[in-house]
Image: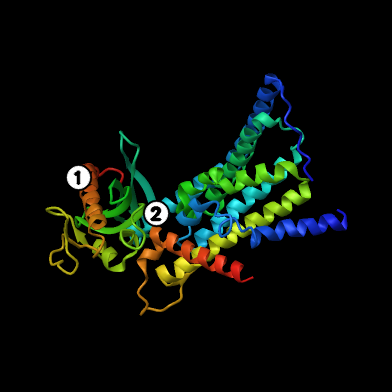
């Protein structure tokens, strides 16, 4: 890779983490951001699984970008994504059974995460492998980071613990609403305000 | 930077169908491989989880043996034995409607004393923080360490438990608590006669 390419790669990687963060800026992939972020552990596993699928799919879609006929490209992307997701589903069931049980159907639903298909259509299918990987790693990392932020806030307030370790002592009355669906919406709203405010100040 | 091929007006149908077929075929092969590679491990996880649950609902169990199998849905009742080989009790699976979705339980039943001696929630989608406490609330779980089953198990408001066959419900999770009791009653009704028959004939247990 030439120096210029390397700089591009760095830009494509970092944009997903902050400037174009999929959850807080592009507001994509909200279903898992709400549904499985009631604890930090769930958010970590979900974020990791999604990032893995995104990186793997972007690699393959970028490699195949000259071979795939345009009219059926979306179907092919979905086949690629669904294959990765099913493999992740098997792997989690085999090696992380507790997390797999917690996340349940939301693992399979990674297939329809618009973030993943969106990156294939908007980026990986038009760019060389190196840049596609940088973009996928940045977007996947940014997504996982966003989920972990939501998950950490909800677990601390809703259960008084972090990663299952009690944090706030026995006198803390957990805010049950934070681990319920409305807590996800409240947390996301708070973080969206925070991100918008910080961006406006800059 | 855009290197994608421009859309051609006529990509032959055969080529389109061919690409999809190849993609589907490769995907299928990968999935078969992934399934075969993980299936034994997944199966083992299920067995371990079930064995762990049986040991928890039948305290003191070191050996587990499948004893009765339902002919309609394949559910299995396990007998648990302690280190000396004595019968601790039977682990009975049961499920039924909860507040959100079906709740499936495993409970330990000691036929000699006609008591429930343990209960585990195997699977539930009860409300986090409220209904899901049927699996975790220590006060609620304590109901099931020494629960009489005759004439039948009755749910009461928290703190009102006076008789051995009553269950203190969880405040704020009455429906889930009552669902657990209903599931236990149904599970007992379904299996008790068969279990008693197994014992009186001096069969395998």
Q: What whole-number distance in Å separates the C-alpha atoms at marks 1 and 2?
A: 26 Å
Number of residues whose C-alpha sits closer than 10 Å to that of mark 2, classed few (under 14), some (14–19) or many (20 or more): some
Residue A12 - label: none
- At a point 78% along the width and 50% down the height, the residue shown is A130
Q: Quadrant of the C terminus of chain A?
A: bottom right
Task: Identify residue for label 2.
Answer: B63
The lab-note entry on whether marks 1 and 2 share a chain reads yes
Specify which label sits upstream in the sequence, 1 or 2: 2
- At a point 73% along the width and 56% down the height, the residue shown is A12
Residue projecting furthest to the front: A200
Please state if A27 lies on the left or on the right of B177 as rendered: right
The tally of labels here is 2
* Element assignment for label 2: strand
Q: Is residue B110 visible?
A: no
Q: Nearer the viewer, residue A32 or B183?
A: A32
Q: Report x, y in % for residue A93.
A: 52, 49
Number of residues whose C-alpha sits closer than 10 Å to that of mark 1, classed few (under 14), some (14–19) or many (20 or more): few
Task: Identify residue for label 1.
Answer: B189
Q: Is residue A185 visible?
A: yes
- At a point 33% along the width and 44% down the height, the residue shown is B67
Q: Quadrant of residue B62?
A: bottom left
Q: Report x, y in % for residue B47.
A: 45, 48
* Element assignment for label 1: helix
Please state if B26 lies on the left or on the right of A7 as rendered: left
């Amino acid at each position: 890779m030439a120096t210029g390419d390397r700089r591009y790669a760095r830009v494509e990687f970092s944009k997903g983490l902050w400037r174009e963060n999929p959850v807080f800026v592009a507001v994509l992939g909200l279903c898992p951001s709400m549904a499985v972020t009631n604890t930090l552990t769930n958010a970590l596993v979900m974020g990791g699984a999604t990032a893995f699928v995104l990186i793997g799919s972007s690699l393959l879609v970028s490699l195949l970008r000259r071979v795939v006929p345009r009219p059926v490209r979306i179907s092919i992307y979905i086949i690629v994504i669904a294959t990765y997701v099913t493999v992740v589903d098997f792997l989690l069931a085999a090696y992380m059974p507790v997390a797999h049980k917690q996340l349940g159907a939301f693992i399979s639903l990674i297939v329809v995460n618009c973030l993943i298909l969106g990156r294939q259509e908007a980026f990986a299918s038009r760019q060389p492998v190196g840049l596609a990987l940088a973009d996928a790693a940045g977007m996947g990392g940014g997504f996982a980071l966003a989920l972990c932020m939501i998950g950490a806030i909800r677990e601390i307030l809703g259960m008084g613990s972090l990663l299952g370790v009690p944090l706030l002592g026995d006198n803390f009355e957990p805010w049950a609403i934070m681990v319920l669906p409305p807590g996800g919406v409240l947390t996301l709203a708070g973080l969206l305000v925070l991100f918008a405010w910080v961006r406006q100040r800059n | 930077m855009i290197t994608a091929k421009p859309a051609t007006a006529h990509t032959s149908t055969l080529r389109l169908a061919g690409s999809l077929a190849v993609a589907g075929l490769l995907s299928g092969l990968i999935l078969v491989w992934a399934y075969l590679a993980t299936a034994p491990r997944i199966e083992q996880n299920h067995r371990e989880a079930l064995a762990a649950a049986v040991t928890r609902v039948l305290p003191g169990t070191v050996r587990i043996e499948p004893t009765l199998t339902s002919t309609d849905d394949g559910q299995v009742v396990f007998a648990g034995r302690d280190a000396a080989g004595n019968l601790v009790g039977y682990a009975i699976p049961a499920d039924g409607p909860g507040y959100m979705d079906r709740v499936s339980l495993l409970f330990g039943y000691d036929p000699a004393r006609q008591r429930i001696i343990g209960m585990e929630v195997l699977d539930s989608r009860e409300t986090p923080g409220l209904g899901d406490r049927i699996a975790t609330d220590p006060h609620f779980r304590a109901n099931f360490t020494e629960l009489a089953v005759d004439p039948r198990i009755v749910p009461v408001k928290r703190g009102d438990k006076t008789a051995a066959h009553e269950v203190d419900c969880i405040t704020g999770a009455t429906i889930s608590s009552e669902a657990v009791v209903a599931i236990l009653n149904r599970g007992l009704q379904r299996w008790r006669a068969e279990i008693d028959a197994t014992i009186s004939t001096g069969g395998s247990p």
